[in-house]
Image (cartoon, coloured by chain):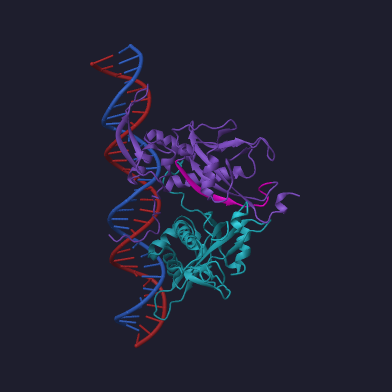
Chain colours: A purple, B cyan, C blue, D red
Amino acid sequence: MPKSTTESRPAHESLAAVLQVRDGVLQVLLWQRAKQPSLGAWALPGGRLERGETLEHSIRRHLAAKVDVRDLAHMEQLETRSDPGRHPEEWLVATAYLGLVPADVDPRVPEDTTWHPVDELPPMAFDHGEIALAGRERLRAKLSYTNVGFALAPPSFTISELRGLYSAALGHDVSATNLQRVLLRRQLLEPTGETRPPGRAGGRPAAVFRFAAAGLEVTDPFAVLRPPDPR
Amino acid sequence: MPKSTTESRPAHESLAAVLQVRDGVLQVLLWQRAKQPSLGAWALPGGRLERGETLEHSIRRHLAAKVDVRDLAHMEQLETRSDPGRHPEEWLVATAYLGLVPADVDPRVPEDTTWHPVDELPPMAFDHGEIALAGRERLRAKLSYTNVGFALAPPSFTISELRGLYSAALGHDVSATNLQRVLLRRQLLEPTGETRPPGRAGGRPAAVFRFAAAGLEVTDPFAVLRPPDPR
DNA sequence: CCAGTTATCGACTGATAGGCAAAAACTCGC
DNA sequence: GCGAGTTTTTGCCTATCAGTCGATAACTGG
């Protein structure tokens, strides 16, 4: 008799969609299952919630087995999935997180673990594919009204470099002109004063910027229906 | 020995912050605990996740004991709370939902259950106060970039009535002029053609509107960093 | 018919996004 | 060292939209 019919409470696991822009493409960290069920399918890192820890602690603990957790520039809770059929053998509730790794680091990962473009996911175990896509959508939305960009970008960068990261994450082109103006007006970016020498092909040296804040900030108090400004 | 040290997996409950604008104030549905722990404190409706059901099914089932679930115009998952200390006696993970009830219905509620202004919460059990506030914030954010308003409003209404609902939910004044123009331009509202006769004090009769869509729609493709328009 | 009240509409302002093109600053080859 | 090519930066123009104010419309009550 399977566990699911005997237990009175579900097991609980934490999962993470860890995203990074690599080679100009938004990718997610996956590991390949070496046992049943879903042998050979790809899965998100994660594991059981242990007594005495929070879910956030749990996902960090399990992630530590796959990447250097210090490389994570941002993490937030995504959603909790509870479909009784989401795991074939067990009653297993999963709380998913979104993790972001800046483009300048290349974390060591184990043998069974690699990055995959989120737009071309391999055969995925359980509902992990849906979770990865949900992570992508959350990231895309937040790029527009928060400063999450800081979690995708290196400590300092040129506008072109940042443009590459944004367009990879968003899945469409963004104009460098506009990106710079918008982020500067919102005071998310500040110039470091340095400049980056041009490549072999020449060109004007690019100004170097950094994000003004290190943590997540909601920048757009949604223009609409704003409180009346007592000016 | 408390359960929490013997069980290998946490119990899992669903909770809901059910919000409604009542008497011009945003209120949340609470019931008063009649037993320990937190005897006398106020709590969100909810209860255990049972085998074979999803969390959404679970919260609807438990809510049915407090309100007519058909009165809920919208429901969405809020967050999952897992602090081991959130319940004094038990290892209990909670997944919270946000529920919205239109202003024109007055659901029957049991003896122990009443509405409380979210801005003046009574002494709350466990972390339920934080969850209620998280629900308020989620609602406020979504009022600006989605059509959630439909879940707060009656089937049809005048702009002044809608203005009252929005300002109660947002916690600040909104101009009627602006509200109408913004919602109309976004094609969230459509006129019914009818008009509402003025009150005793006189005044021009108000046009009656309804929300164009019944379900949740994200309206603002965040102006920023929009994909290039191939016009 | 007039004063008071409420709702609607139009006009103006300010902020911001998006696009285009010119100017700036460099490399390379001749 | 000069011009062609490249890349980045800047300024200008336009369109859209939010926010405000004031005028007008449509009613009630005396």
Which x, y percent locates residue B149? 49, 62
Residue B115 is at least partly visible in this image: yes
Which x, y percent locates residue B223? 42, 48
In the image, taking residue A82 as reference, residue B131 lies left or right, namely: left
Q: Does B8 sit above or below residue A170?
A: below
Numbered-mark total: 0
Q: In the displayed image of the protein, which residue is found farthest to the right?
A: A1
Q: Give yes or no for residue A76 being in the magenta stretch.
A: yes
The C terminus of chain B is located in which quarter? top left
Magenta range: A73-87
Q: Does A204 sit above or below residue D13?
A: above
Q: Nearer the viewer, residue B130 or A53?
A: A53
Residue at 48% over, 56% down:
B146
Q: Quadrant of residue C4?
A: bottom left
Residue A135 is at least partly visible in this image: no
In the image, taking residue A37 as reference, residue B176 lies left or right, namely: left
Q: In the displayed image of the protein, which residue is found farthest to the front?
A: B1
Residue at 53% over, 42% down:
A61
Q: Nearer the viewer, residue C6 or B4?
A: B4
Q: Nearer the viewer, residue D19 or B37?
A: B37
Residue at 49% over, 36% down:
A68
Residue at 55% over, 43% down:
A16
In the image, taking residue A66 as reference, residue D27 lies left or right, namely: left
